[in-house]
Image (cartoon, rainbow, N blue to C red):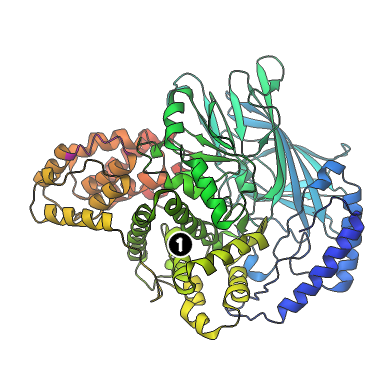
């Protein structure tokens, strides 16, 4: 990466390439090919569009080309840094059509109008392009976009073709450049765009105004933004979003016009945003609705619908303490503000780490702050995931495993060791369950690095964080913390692979210590199935007490003796998830009536109870099940219920089909497609 500020641009580039080409050759002498055919180069600084092109003649040619490009680019655009890409074999992203080593997008500027009647976003996307010498075309990712025209910056038409539609990846949009380094695409999304959910008023908290939100991860943003939709191709971006005047638009970027936007014609207002740091494009996010803001501190606050604002602000009220804890651990927060948006119940995830504006599910609002680990998790992504990003989805554990470990450290700093132990022990239980459900410790889907999207359940989170916790245990916390902090600094605003991480930890932590290398078992963790023998399990005294209460109930004790007053979400989950999957109806009835499970307003508790009820075909719980799946759209909480119904054969499958038919319109497209595969498998 290079900065373009005080020195002449050509001098900066020349210095950059000279210094980092030398570093490449020095470090490459230490590189070992430790994983099949992968060539693991430990270098982290290469060309802005190629991380392994380093021959001196090529550099001279590319230097001239880039200098010409940058000198021809407006000064404002030159301020932003161009993030490198990876071109080593393991960094090839099979979920994109793009060919970034030939031509890549460096900046996206969208000017779009939200049409709540047609359910479309329409307008233009202007793309700044960095191309290799002789590049004739650029390949973009789109998914069912209606492309009206493409021109260069001066309005001259450019030829383009739209490739065949792939049901998973969408289409390749190939644009002939004719020397252009900025192109303008006029287009519109479709009503069924996979990233966008258009909610009628009745599906919002206020029940009066419509709502729109996007969910880009993993590759959904190509359904409303034509660009290179790969986590390894980081881009800066800006946006002007025009919406009905009685609604507010928010995005994952700095607000240019404040909270009220500016007039944009009859009955409309525009809101402008700017992200001047290169990010993977899946982090570009939008929401439009009847939104209000409440500060939670000098650099944080929460957006949501007015009726939810006070409860949401209370639930996330510890966020400033979390930001302080995170910075004390692993270095400065580099994104300016940390605001949050609490969405309607159809939001498909617990949270989404969109920079400057984390998206959160309302299911975390339970009044006791027992689910603030979700906030800590999304905040931690500001380092692991947003700052250093998996280059492909084969390495998503680099985002989620690192973040789950970091989240736990934040929780420990803010709430103490036992609270952190509760979360770590809960994750260990989930880890064991996922390994079992994946087919056992030798199952390929228990590997951290593997085919994209194929790691079972939440193993990216649970196994990945256990890997890092094990390293911490072996080398000691102070040494590991120092390493992680330096790791985030070295690789800030860059993509990463498993091979790259292993090369980095060997160079900067192991440092040739053969005994330490053997103790860590790095390759077994990263590439092997199951759990290595050195895995560290943190246990919780609080959860051990829950286990004792559950054992007493299973042995025949009354439900009234369980005494759940003051339980956190995690204690409830420990009790319910650990119960035998087969219980007599009388015991289920006793549990439900004594503990109020079918009427619980805690979505985590309700989901865990309904899983148990479904496993026993307990029909008195069916009204609660129907109410739940038609009002909650979080995939983590509803997918197990549909899966459980389908496992119940002739009893459960018709119920699953009926409920999905009723609930589908209220689910985000990503959730709906996932449940579709469960209920109507091909």
Could you tell me if residue 168 is visible in this image? no
Question: What is the span of residues highlighted in magenta in the rendered image?
Answer: 595-602
In this image, 620 relative to 480: left or right? left
Report the side of 9 relative to 667 (left or right).
right
In this view, 506 is above or below 357: below
Bin the neighbour count of mark 1 within 10 Å (Cα to Cα): few under 14, some 14-19, many 20 and up: many
Element at badge 1? helix
- Picture residue at 34% right of the left edge, 59% below the top: 425
Q: Position of residue 320 (x, y in %)?
A: 52, 41
For this orientation, the residue located farthest to the bottom is 514
User: Residue at point 40% right, 49% down?
Assistant: 415
Give the x, y percent position of residue 183: 81, 43
Residue 203 highlighted magenta (yes or no)? no
Quarter placement of the N terminus: bottom right
Q: Which residue occupies 46% across, 74% down?
A: 474
| Residue under pointer 1 | 465
Q: Main secondary structure of the magenta part?
A: loop
Quadrant position of residue 591: top left
Residue 10 in the image, given as x and y percentages of width and height: 91, 58
């Amino acid at each position: 990466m290079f900065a373009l500020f005080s020195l002449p641009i050509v001098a900066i580039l020349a210095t950059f390439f000279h210094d980092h080409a030398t570093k490449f050759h020095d470090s490459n002498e230490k590189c070992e090919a430790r994983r099949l055919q992968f060539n693991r180069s430990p270098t982290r600084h290469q060309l802005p569009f190629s991380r392994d092109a380093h021959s001196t003649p090529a550099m001279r040619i590319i230097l001239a080309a880039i200098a010409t490009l940058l000198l021809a680019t407006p000064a404002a655009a030159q301020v932003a840094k161009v993030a490198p890409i990876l071109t080593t074999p393991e960094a090839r992203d099979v979920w994109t059509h793009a060919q970034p080593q030939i031509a890549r997008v460096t900046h996206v500027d969208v000017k779009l109008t939200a049409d709540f009647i047609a359910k479309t976003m329409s307008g233009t996307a202007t793309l700044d392009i960095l191309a290799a010498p002789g590049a004739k075309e650029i390949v973009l990712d789109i998914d069912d976009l209606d492309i009206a025209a493409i021109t260069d910056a001066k309005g001259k038409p450019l030829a383009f073709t739209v490739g065949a539609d792939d049901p998973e990846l969408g289409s390749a949009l190939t644009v002939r450049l004719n020397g252009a380094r900025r192109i303008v695409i006029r287009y519109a999304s479709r009503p069924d765009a996979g990233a966008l959910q258009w909610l009628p008023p009745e599906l919002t908290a206020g029940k009066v105004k419509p709502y729109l939100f996007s969910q880009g991860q993993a590759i959904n943003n190509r359904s409303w933004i034509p660009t290179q939709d790969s986590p390894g191709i980081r881009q800066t971006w800006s946006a002007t979003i025009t919406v009905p005047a009685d609604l507010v638009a928010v995005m994952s970027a700095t607000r240019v016009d404040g909270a009220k936007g500016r007039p944009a014609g009859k009955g409309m207002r525009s809101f402008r945003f700017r992200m001047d740091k290169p990010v993977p494009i899946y982090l570009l996010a939008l929401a439009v609705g009847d939104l209000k803001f409440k500060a939670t501190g000098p650099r944080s606050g929460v957006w949501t619908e007015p009726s939810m604002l006070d409860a949401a602000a209370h639930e996330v009220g510890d966020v400033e303490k979390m930001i302080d804890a995170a910075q004390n651990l692993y270095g400065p927060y580099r994104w300016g503000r940390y605001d949050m948006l609490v969405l309607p119940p159809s939001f498909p995830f617990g949270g989404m780490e969109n920079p400057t504006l984390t998206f959160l599910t309302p299911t975390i609002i339970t009044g006791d702050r027992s689910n603030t680990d979700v906030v800590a998790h999304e905040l931690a992504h500001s380092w692991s995931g947003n700052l250093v990003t998996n280059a492909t989805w084969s390495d998503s554990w680099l985002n989620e495993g690192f973040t789950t470990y970091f989240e736990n450290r934040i929780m420990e700093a803010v709430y103490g060791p036992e609270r952190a132990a509760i979360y770590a022990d809960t994750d260990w239980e989930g880890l064991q369950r996922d390994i079992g459900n994946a087919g056992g410790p030798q199952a390929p889907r228990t590997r951290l690095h593997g085919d994209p999207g194929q790691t079972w359940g939440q193993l990216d989170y649970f196994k990945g964080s256990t890997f890092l916790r094990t390293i911490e245990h072996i080398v000691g916390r102070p040494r590991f913390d120092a390493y992680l902090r330096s790791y985030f600094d070295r690789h800030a605003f860059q993509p990463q692979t498993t091979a790259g991480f292993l090369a980095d930890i060997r160079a900067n932590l192991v440092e040739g210590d053969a005994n330490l290398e053997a103790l860590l078992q790095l390759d077994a963790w990263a590439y092997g199935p199951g759990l290595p023998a050195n895995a560290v399990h943190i246990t919780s005294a609080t959860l051990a007490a829950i286990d004792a209460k559950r054992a007493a109930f299973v042995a025949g004790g009354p439900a009234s003796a369980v005494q759940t007053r003051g339980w956190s979400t995690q204690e409830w989950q420990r009790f319910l998830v650990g119960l035998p999957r087969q219980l007599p109806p009388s015991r289920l009835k006793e549990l439900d009536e004594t503990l109020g499970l079918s009427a619980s307003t805690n979505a985590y508790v309700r989901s865990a109870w309904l899983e148990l009820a479904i496993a026993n075909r307990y029909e008195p719980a069916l009204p609660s099940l129907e109410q739940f799946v038609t009002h909650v759209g979080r995939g983590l909480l509803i997918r197990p219920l549909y899966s459980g119904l389908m496992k119940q054969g002739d009893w459960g499958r018709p119920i699953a089909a009926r409920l999905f038919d009723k609930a589908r319109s209220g689910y985000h497209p990503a959730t709906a497609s996932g449940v579709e595969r469960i209920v109507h498998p091909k």
